[in-house]
């Protein structure tokens, strides 16, 4: 038996559907998005006190249409636009099709920067207010409002068509790739906040999972869509054990695995296995026998999840998966993660040599990144080189903007320093 959805849940589900219908009818995504936001605010105030209407979607669509019409009356094109609205069917009798995917493709268009796409997605598809999005990203509301406004203007001048690209069309891989990338970035920011006092923001990671579920429901045959959702579920399943009672970071090897959410992990594992059995559809790198980046990352997460104890982890398999992922993406962060797996397979010396090659092979953007120093410190500690390890832990702590990560790295440096001091007496 499941709990009845709240008004907030209902509004989040209906927001992109109403926006999609309105934008298709009227063609002005910017004005329609503002009108839908006003309708959502009105519903949030009216429904809890007076009850949810019998046709909530029609109520929102009718209210948003009225808000849109009111806005248009003040513009020079009032008569032409009102005549266009008057020719349309009654809002309450509109089609019940779910336009969520069309709205998501619009918000994640390659013309937008990732930061702008995330903000616009949270507002137009996630149903969050500008104030909520600003709070989640630790920026003033006015700053976030400007970011969203610029994103909508960019879409307007780019003449982006309100539609879902046709699978197999020349631009399909890039457009779908943009959608998945935005959801991936959104989840990562929620799971490991890039800055601020907390390690994770469950509201952002939860919203990414919710949207990924919608995309998977609408595109069930896309292997990389399922792979991304599987990755999110497998990773989110570990979240209960990632922090201690005071919000301190607990690394994967030290986590109490009995706290992991096995329901999410089992769902993610089953979803991942289904993609490999089906092979996926071409168009996003999800060809049979050639999984794309999201399925490979999900496979790595699944191997970690399968280990009852940290010492049971199949590091050789994880290293092999990272090699495949490195070949697919060419991302230096993947090489950095592969170094950790390599250390567990062949020892820290081999991994340190890999880091040295990474720093000099033309992909040196990570040279001054806190993660590079943190991994190097970890490998040096494994090798018994405590003095340089302490130095790199301190460098990593100074470079990160995440308070929990900073405390963890500082504590590691302090403990290593104390353990290496000669005893007296």
Image: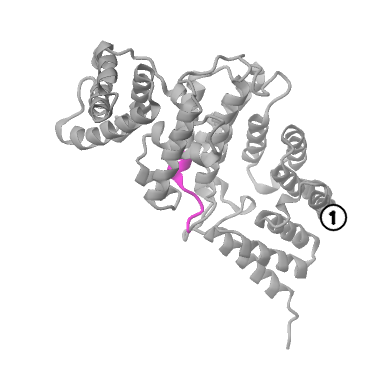
Coordinates of residue 140 in the picture (x, y in percent): 40, 53
Foreground: 211 or 59? 59
Residue range highlighted in magenta: 197-207
Foreground: 158 or 236? 158
Horizontal relation, residue 269 to residue 161: left or right: right
Residue at horizontal 58 percent and vertical 62 percent from the top: 406
The quarter of the image holding the N terminus is top left
Compared with 318, 167 (above or below) is above
Inspect this view and state whether residue 1 appears: no
The quarter of the image holding the C terminus is bottom right
Could you tell me how many numbered marks the image carries? 1
Coordinates of residue 67 in the picture (x, y in percent): 24, 29
Foreground: 67 or 187? 67
Foreground: 73 or 383? 73
Residue at horizontal 66 percent and vertical 61 percent from the top: 396
Image coloring type: one colour
Q: Is residue 203 magenta?
A: yes
Inspect this view and state whether residue 399 appears: yes
Coordinates of residue 403 in the picture (x, y in percent): 53, 61
Horizontal relation, residue 6 to residue 384: left or right: left
User: In this view, which residue lies farthest toward the bottom?
Assistant: 425
Q: Secondary structure at mark 1?
A: helix
Coordinates of residue 230 in the picture (x, y in percent): 57, 31
Residue at horizontal 38 percent and vertical 21 percent from the top: 27
User: In this view, which residue lies farthest toward the left?
Assistant: 50
Query: Badge 1 local density, few (<14 within 10 Å), some, or many (20+)?
Result: some
Q: Is residue 221 magenta?
A: no
Horizontal relation, residue 144 to residue 398: left or right: left
The residue at which mark 1 appears reads as 349
């Amino acid at each position: 038996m499941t709990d009845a959805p709240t008004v907030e849940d209902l509004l989040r589900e209906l927001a992109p559907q109403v926006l999609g219908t309105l934008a298709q009818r009227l063609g002005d995504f910017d004005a329609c998005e503002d009108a839908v936001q006003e309708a959502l605010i009105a519903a949030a105030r009216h429904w809890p006190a007076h009850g949810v209407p019998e046709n909530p979607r029609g109520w929102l669509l009718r209210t948003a249409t009225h808000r849109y019409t009111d806005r248009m009356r003040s513009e020079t094109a009032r008569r032409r636009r009102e005549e266009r609205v008057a020719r349309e069917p009654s809002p309450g009798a509109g089609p019940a099709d779910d336009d969520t995917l069309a709205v998501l493709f619009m918000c994640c268009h390659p013309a937008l920067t990732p930061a702008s796409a995330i903000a616009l997605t949270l507002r137009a598809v996630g149903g969050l207010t500008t104030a909520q999005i600003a709070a989640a990203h630790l920026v003033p509301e006015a700053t976030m409002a400007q970011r969203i406004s610029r994103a909508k203007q960019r879409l307007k001048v780019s003449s982006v068509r309100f539609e879902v690209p046709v699978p197999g069309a020349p631009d399909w891989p890039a457009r779908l790739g943009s959608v998945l990338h935005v959801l991936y970035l959104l989840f990562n920011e929620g799971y490991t906040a890039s800055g601020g006092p907390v390690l994770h923001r469950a509201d952002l990671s939860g919203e990414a999972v919710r949207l990924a579920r919608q995309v998977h429901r609408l595109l069930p045959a896309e292997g990389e869509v399922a792979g991304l959702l599987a990755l999110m579920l497998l990773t989110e399943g570990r979240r209960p054990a990632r922090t201690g009672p005071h919000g301190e970071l607990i690394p994967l090897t030290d986590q109490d695995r009995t706290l992991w959410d096995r329901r999410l992990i089992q769902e993610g594992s089953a979803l991942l296995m289904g993609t490999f059995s089906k092979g996926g559809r071409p168009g996003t790198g999800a060809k049979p026998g050639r999984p794309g980046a999201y399925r490979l990352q999900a496979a790595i997460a699944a191997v970690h999840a399968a280990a009852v104890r940290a010492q049971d982890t199949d590091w050789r398999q994880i290293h092999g998966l990272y090699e495949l992922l490195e070949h697919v993406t060419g991302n230096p962060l993947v090489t950095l993660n592969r170094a950790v797996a390599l250390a567990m397979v062949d020892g820290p010396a081999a991994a340190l040599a890999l880091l040295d090659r990474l720093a000099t092979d033309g992909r040196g953007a990570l040279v001054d990144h806190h993660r590079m120093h943190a991994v190097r410190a970890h490998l040096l500690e494994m090798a018994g080189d405590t003095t340089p390890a302490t130095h790199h832990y301190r460098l990593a702590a100074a470079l990160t903007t995440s308070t929990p990560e900073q405390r963890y790295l500082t504590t590691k440096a302090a403990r290593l320093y104390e353990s290496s001091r000669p005893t007296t007496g």
